[in-house]
Image: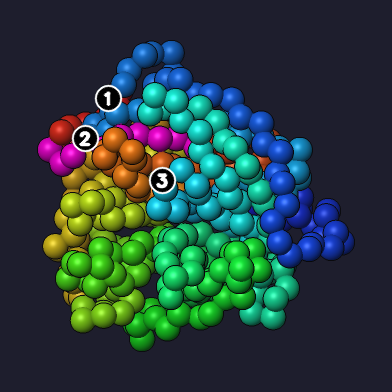
């Protein structure tokens, strides 16, 4: 399914390949429709370890808009940056009322640039999948993982991310032999005050080790090296971020034809992540097509104004008329508050 939709995406992009792309953000008029209930037709609030906090369906007349595969937030917890796996930045501000997601303001769109300051171009070079914002030397910066080239790049705002040229991030020597189009999907930034000392952490989508588990890496620091994430129930890893307690929250997806997609979040104890380890953890939530989901690919963790841990998810519509671009939000209730519980 994913390869077929990717092919459709490529055809759409090929139709506009002759359009010159200018660097820099431009306004992106985005229509939104509110999602009031996560479980279709039922007013249910609690799903595993999470409470649903609203959602949006996004639409645009821009033929290139969509394919959102990663998302993260600035320190205010409202201003976001997202990436498309066709090589674009998307930024704006989420609007919330009473703690629930109701809209987007100030939406903008821009092509990502290569090291020569040109748009990334063809899909092979533009397949951005994971995104984490940070601050380096007082400037906003972004780590972005690329799935087909299987590399990690650092963008430093100059003066913003749309004009930034990427720097290649050195990976552990073991990060080779990754499967094309199933490689470096997730990048997370470990807590700076934890044993991983703020290192980027990478997990592959479906590049597996000899025992059939997801290959993963701590990129640098005192514990730099390879580890593995237990593969369970034929789910692929699509994103992940660290929770305030130091655990790694993974977003996972499974495609079952002709029934559609499944989504779940799995919580990996942070103190188990170290070189040579095989890590696993409880399923914190699971959803299927009875819920308001699509091809969920991006995840961000923030702390809101009430001090609650907020989880924001975004979907990749593969530029297909059969799919949707969604933004969903949940409030994490903490470990042990429904772990393993399915949503239905």
Q: Are marks 2 and 1 in contact (CB under 8 Å)?
A: yes
Q: Quadrant of residue 159?
A: bottom right
Q: Is residue 177 visible?
A: no
Q: Which residue is more in the foreground, 323 or 330? A: 330
The C terminus: image quadrant? top left
| Disc 3: which residue | 77
Mark sitting on residue 296: none
- Say which residue label 2 marks: 333
Q: Residue at x 66, y 41 (%)?
A: 320
Q: Nearer the viewer, residue 272 or 119?
A: 119
> Is residue 112 within the magenta segment?
no
289 lies above or below 74: above
**Residue range (magenta):** 327-336
* Element class at badge 2: loop
Tell me what residue is drawn at x 33 percent, y 38 percent: 305
- Disc 1: which residue: 46
């Amino acid at each position: 399914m994913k390869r077929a939709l990717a092919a459709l995406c490529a055809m759409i992009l090929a139709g506009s390949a002759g359009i010159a792309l200018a660097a820099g953000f431009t306004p992106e008029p985005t229509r939104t429709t509110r999602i009031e209930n996560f479980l279709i037709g039922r007013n249910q609030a609690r799903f595993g370890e999470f409470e649903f906090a609203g959602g949006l369906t996004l639409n645009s007349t821009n033929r290139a808009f969509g394919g959102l595969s990663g998302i993260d937030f600035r320190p205010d917890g409202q201003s976001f940056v997202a990436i498309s796996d066709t090589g674009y930045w998307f930024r704006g501000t989420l609007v919330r009322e009473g703690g629930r997601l109701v809209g987007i303001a100030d939406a903008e769109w821009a092509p990502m640039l290569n090291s020569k300051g040109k748009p990334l171009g063809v899909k092979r070079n533009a397949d951005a999948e994971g995104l984490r914002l940070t601050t380096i030397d007082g400037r906003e910066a972004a780590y972005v993982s690329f799935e087909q080239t299987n590399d990690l790049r650092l963008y430093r705002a100059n003066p913003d991310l749309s004009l930034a040229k990427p720097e290649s991030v050195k990976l552990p020597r073991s990060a080779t032999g990754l499967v094309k189009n199933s490689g470096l999907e997730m990048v997370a930034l470990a807590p700076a005050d934890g044993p991983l000392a703020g290192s980027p952490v990478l997990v592959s989508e479906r590049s597996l080790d000899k025992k059939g588990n997801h290959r993963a890496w701590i990129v640098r620091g005192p514990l730099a090296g390879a580890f593995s994430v237990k593969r369970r129930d034929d789910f692929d890893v699509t994103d992940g971020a660290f929770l305030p307690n130091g655990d790694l929250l993974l977003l996972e997806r499974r495609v079952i034809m002709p029934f559609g997609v499944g989504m779940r979040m799995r919580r990996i104890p942070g103190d188990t992540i170290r070189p040579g380890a095989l890590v696993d953890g409880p399923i914190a939530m699971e959803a299927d097509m009875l819920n308001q989901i699509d091809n969920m690919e991006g995840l961000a963790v923030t702390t809101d104004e009430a001090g609650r841990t907020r989880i924001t998810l975004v979907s990749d519509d593969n530029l297909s008329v059969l799919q949707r671009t969604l933004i969903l939000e949940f409030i994490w209730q903490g470990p042990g508050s429904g772990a393993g519980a399915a949503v239905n």
